[in-house]
Each structure stands twice: as structure tokens, then as C-alpha cells.
């Protein structure tokens, strides 16, 4: 089945540690996105990539980093510089410049 | 600057009722307006979408009404069922810009349909 796989589903981290969230898609989509979801704030765009080896900052990129070395993979690193990292992180993809976003099931990060 | 404002934040209706969720946008360049449905612990999924060349779109029990002059659009759920209980997000994007189809989301509405 085609889709987006995010891992891990749950992750606990101590303050000061970096953590990397995995996102893999087998939909052959060009574009991939990372969103952060907090209660009452909707989904906010962290980073997006329209093509391999290229990515752009979204609205809340500070404290995050990404890479796009392969079309099917778009990992997100939450660095120790991110002041409030506890959140639900969603990866998505679509064909470049088309409408429907396909989402993964999310990764819930808790900083202890 | 919040570009898509969504209301209400939460909504409770009886089975068979017609919940209505409203969104307003500021950017007149937006030309694609989808609604996403999200169940707890899952990622959002596209429910229905509209472009500004029509004022209404229906898919099953779900209808989007669009008012371009007022820069508002709304989701109506006919004959609502307990299985419709979820969080609903409106969104908007400008497909013409060179930055791809970046969606700007509203803050979400938690809908509960009671028996």
C-alpha cells in the first residue's frame, strides 16, 4: 500500500538532546513537508522540499533542520535550540504544485 | 499574522444535526480551499476542496460554501453521525506562487456528534 510512514510514533527526549524524526513515502511524490501541531494552533509549517537536495524554511523553522537526499525520505531533526519542542509532528507529501496533501500518522515528541 | 481564521473552536451537535464550521482568509491570492478531517492520534485526511470559480461544492454529506467577496468559506455536514466526531481544519493556498502548494491551516474545530 502506498503511503507515508513516520517513526517513531512516540519519542521522549531529555532537554539538550537532538532528536531525528523519520518520514518515508512510497507515493513517488516530489514535494514533502513537515508540520507541527499544537492544541488550539492548527498546523504550522516547519520546512518543505519540492525536489531532492533542495528545501525551504516554513513559518517556524528555528530550532529545526532537515535534509532531502532521496526523493522518498525527508527526516526532521529537532535540535536543542528549539525552545518548546514538545508537540505532535506531521509529515506530508504531494505532487509538486498540486492540491491534496497526504499525511503520515504523526510522531509525538515529549521533552522531559 | 494569522492568514486563515477558523471558528468555532469546538462544537457539539445531536445526531442528524447540521454542524457548520466557518473560515475567513485575508490573502486574496489564495485559490485553493480544502478541508481536512483528523481523528485522534492520526494524521489529517482531505475531506473536500473548492476553488474560487464556484460558490458551492457537495460531496456526499459534506458541502463547502464559498463567498469570494467576503473572503469566507464554510463546511456543512448534513445528517451528522457520531462517526463524524473529529477535528476539522480549513486551509488555503496560492497555487500560482513558485513555492509550491504550501497550505496555511486554520486552528481547527473539534466536533462532537452525540446520540
Image (cartoon, coloured by chain):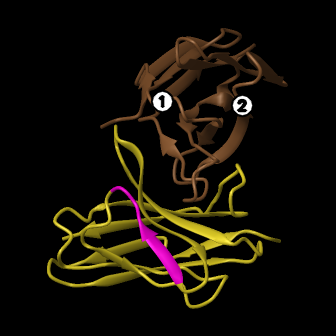
Q: How many marks?
A: 2
In depth, the one of A31 and B77 nearer the eye is A31
Q: Is residue A23 left or right of residue A38?
A: right
Chief secondary structure of the magenta portion:
strand
Residue beneath label 2, please? B51
Q: For label 1, count other residues whose C-alpha is less than 10 Å away and answer few (under 14), some (14-19) or many (20+).
A: many
Q: CA distance from mark 1 to mark 2?
A: 24 Å
Quarter holding residue B19: top right
Query: Pointer 1 indicates a residue of which chain?
Result: B
x and y, in percent, of residue A2 in the image: 79, 70
Q: In the figure, A37 relative to B32: above or below?
A: below
| Range of magenta residues | A54-59
Q: In the figure, A53 relative to B94: above or below?
A: below
x and y, in percent, of residue B1 in the image: 30, 37
Q: Is residue A57 magenta?
A: yes
Q: Is residue B51 magenta?
A: no
Q: Is residue A41 left or right of residue A2?
A: left
The numbered mark at residue B33 is none
Q: Secondary structure at mark 2?
A: loop
Q: Secondary structure at mark 1?
A: strand
x and y, in percent, of residue A70 in the image: 62, 89
Q: Residue at x 66, y 8 (%)?
A: B17
Letter of the chain in brown: B
Residue beneath label 1, please? B110
x and y, in percent, of residue A19 in the image: 32, 82
* Residue B61 seen from this side: no
Q: Mark 1 or mark 2, which is nearer to you?
A: 2
Q: Is residue A50 left or right of residue A2?
A: left
Co-location on one chain, circles 1 and 2: yes
Q: Residue at x 58, y 62 (%)?
A: A105
* First reached walking from the N terminus: tag 1 or tag 2: 2
Query: Pointer 2 indicates a residue of which chain?
Result: B
Amino acid at each position: 500500500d502506498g503511503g507515508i510512514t513516520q517513526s517513531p510514533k512516540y519519542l521522549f527526549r531529555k532537554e539538550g538532546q537532538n532528536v531525528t524524526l523519520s518520514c518515508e513515502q512510497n507515493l513517488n511524490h516530489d514535494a514533502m513537508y513537515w508540520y507541527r501541531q499544537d492544541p488550539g494552533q492548527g498546523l504550522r509549517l516547519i520546512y518543505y522540499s519540492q525536489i531532492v537536495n533542495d528545501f525551504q524554511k516554513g513559518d517556524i523553522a528555528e530550532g529545526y533542520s532537515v535534509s532531502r537526499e532521496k526523493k522518498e525520505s525527508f527526516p526532521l531533526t529537532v535540535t536543542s535550540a528549539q525552545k518548546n519542542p514538545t508537540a505532535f509532528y506531521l509529515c506530508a507529501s504531494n505532487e509538486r504544485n498540486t492540491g491534496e496533501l497526504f499525511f503520515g500518522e504523526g510522531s509525538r515528541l515529549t521533552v522531559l | 499574522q494569522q492568514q486563515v481564521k477558523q471558528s468555532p473552536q469546538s462544537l457539539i451537535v445531536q445526531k442528524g444535526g447540521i454542524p457548520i464550521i466557518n473560515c475567513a482568509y485575508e490573502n486574496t491570492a489564495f485559490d485553493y480551499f480544502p478541508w481536512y478531517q483528523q481523528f485522534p492520534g492520526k494524521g489529517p485526511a482531505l475531506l473536500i476542496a473548492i476553488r474560487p470559480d464556484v460558490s458551492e461544492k457537495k460531496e456526499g454529506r459534506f458541502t463547502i460554501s464559498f463567498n469570494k467577496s467576503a473572503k469566507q468559506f464554510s463546511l456543512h455536514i448534513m445528517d451528522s453521525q457520531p462517526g463524524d466526531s473529529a477535528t476539522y481544519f480549513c486551509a488555503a493556498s496560492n497555487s500560482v506562487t513558485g513555492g509550491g502548494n504550501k497550505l496555511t491551516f486554520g486552528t481547527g474545530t473539534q466536533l462532537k456528534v452525540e446520540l
